Image: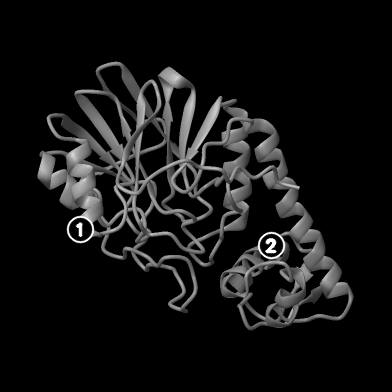
Amino acid sequence: MIPFVRELEFEYGRCDQVSPLIRRVIASNPGPFTYTGTGVYIVGRGEVAVIDPGPDIPEHFEALKAALAGERVSHVLVTHHHLDHSPLAHPLAEAFGAKVHGLPAPADHGEAASPGLEEGADRRFRPDVTLADGDLLSGPGWTLEAVTTPGHTSNHICFALKEENALFCGDHIMGWSTTVITPPDGDMGDYFASLAKVRARNFDVLWPTHGAPVREVAPFIDAYVAHRRGREAQILEALGAGFTTIKAMVPSLYATVDPRLHPAAAHSVFAHMIQLVREGRVVTPGEPGLESEYRLA
């Protein structure tokens, strides 16, 4: 079982000091993929970085501007190009004379257009500054390191706060839920590799964009990986029991999950299936697809 952390004390639009160097403002966009809403992090005092400014909601934009009044925003950082993370990045940067840092949305957008799949993609997202793994961004009393973590999306990037041995982990790891992997942009093999990369860094705390911080980091990531491996085993078991399509197996694999999440769950199963085909454990005629038929190798 994943030791989820779901308790969170907050008020929409309020700026809360959550650590010596970190403040948080939560947008009023709760939902099945955003939990209580998008948590925007402000790092530092006086000269600050803002991480994942969030959705284009006027009252949220005003709350951010109020929280940042009298301060200089030196960096606006975006973990990835989904509509609950990046749309306010450029408006906020323009309001404060800053530049947007991150990785651009994939050129082919690589994401299914089906309804019910997350919050949707900000397909036009392009940062002013494209980051590489290990790049350092700093201000008075704070240093952030770019940590590339593809998997949830191909352009997902986390930010390590050196002074607190903390990681702003976007949607890579979420305290309240597992992360959706939606092919073709999302990739399960990349996701496992990125989880191992974060696990090896021995962070003291993870700050997800949605929900509460994770403070027991190593056991939480281990449980996250175990959950994925368990889901993989369930898929193989379903194939062994005669299920041949993703559509047929999702209702039983996700029987305890909100049915609104079943379309996204199907894409996570698809991501597992692609990886199982790569590994030669499952076969399918032609290229793997969401509607393909599969069998054990």
Name the amino acid, label 2.
Arg
For disc 2, the marked residue is 278
Horizontal and vertical percent for residue 16? 35, 34
Confirm whether residue 254 shows in the render.
yes
Confirm whether residue 297 shows in the render.
no
Counting every numbered tag in the picture gives 2
Horizontal and vertical percent for residue 126? 25, 54
Residues 258 and 279: in front is 258
Query: Dot 1: within a 10 Å radius of its alpha carbon, few (fewer than 14), some, or many (20 or more) residues?
Result: few
Query: With 42 as the anchor, is 193 left or right in this view?
Result: right
Horizontal and vertical percent for residue 198? 57, 35
Q: How is the image coloured?
A: one colour
Q: Residue at x 37, y 68 (%)?
A: 108
Tag 1 secondary structure: helix
Pointer 2 or 1: first along the chain: 1
Query: Dot 2: within a 10 Å radius of its alpha carbon, few (fewer than 14), some, or many (20 or more) residues?
Result: few
Would you identify the image quadrant in which residue 64 lies? top left
Quadrant assignment for the C terminus:
bottom right
Q: Residue at x 33, y 46 (%)?
A: 52
Q: Please tell me whether residue 275 is drawn above or below residue 243 in the rendered image.
A: above
For disc 1, the marked residue is 58
